[in-house]
Amino acid sequence: MIANFATNPVVMPILLIIGIAGILVELFIPRYGLFAIVGIFSFVLYFFGHYIAGFSGSGPITLFLIGMIFLILEIFIPGGIIGALGAILLFAGIISAAENTSYGVFSLFIALGVNSVLLYLLLKYVGHRGWWNHLILKEEQKKETGYVSHNKNKNLLGKTGFTLTKLRPSGIAIIDHLRYDVVSQGDWIEANQEIKVILIEGTRIVVEER
């Protein structure tokens, strides 16, 4: 019964939509893992249904799990490469688990289309909250959003501000109501901590926690 339900061509994209949406919403609106649990359960139902139906072995599940691990690592080690590789592995697992590759591709395409709209709405109305803060360094640094060029940073020495993101050791800080790329003096500094500029070295703004 579970196999028939999870492998139904109509149900497949719905399970994937819920799975991706649950993780997306959890990134923006943390609820003690509630949304993530719903998303994970949906993915489990998708893979378990295909597994007991005989369409999928352990390979697609392994690809999916490794992809998820890479995406989680991307939160803590931003850069884009790990996240991109994780997404590729995750998608490969989803597609290869399906009875027919075309079913898998179609279901994934529908799920990504729906969730791209959801992501747009989350970015527009919720903003950078929750775990999404860890990915904030991927924002394009436009002048219109408050960033300034480093050639105007010489007058910042000795000034104070606060961290907008975690400094690991680099990140973003607010100084004189403007955003700056800064780096701590070796130590990691949490977000929303008061900092002081102690060194201007070329394009580097070095700060320490007060």
Image: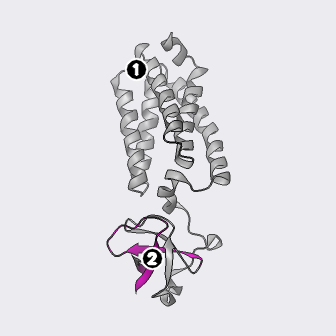
Q: Residues within 10 Å of mark 1 (few under 14, many from 20)?
A: many
Residue 201 appears anywhere in the view: no
x and y, in percent, of residue 32 in the image: 49, 42
Q: Residue furthest top?
A: 1
Q: How is this picture coloured?
A: one colour
x and y, in percent, of residue 73 in the image: 38, 49
Residue 192 appears anywhere in the view: yes
Q: Is residue 69 toward the left or the right of residue 158 in the image? A: left
Q: Is residue 169 above or below residue 77?
A: below
Q: Earlier in the sequence, mark 1 or mark 2?
A: 1
Q: Nearer the viewer, mark 1 or mark 2?
A: 2
Of the 4 image quadrants, the one containing the C terminus is: bottom left
Q: Residue at x 43, y 20 (%)?
A: 48
Q: Is residue 102 above or below residue 121?
A: above
Residue 201 on the magenta segment:
yes
Magenta stretch, main secondary structure, is strand
Image quadrant of residue 103? top right
Image quadrant of residue 85? top left
The stretch in magenta equals 177-206
Q: Residue at x 65, y 72 (%)?
A: 144
Look at the numbered disc 2 and give the secondary structure of its residue: strand
Q: Is residue 9 toward the left or the right of residue 98 in the image? A: right
Look at the numbered disc 1 and give the secondary structure of its residue: loop
Q: Residue at x 58, y 19 (%)?
A: 9
- For badge 1, the amino acid type reads Ser
Q: Return the residue nearer the eye: 84 or 45.
A: 45
**Circle 2 is placed at which residue position?**
195
Residue 56, numbered label: 1
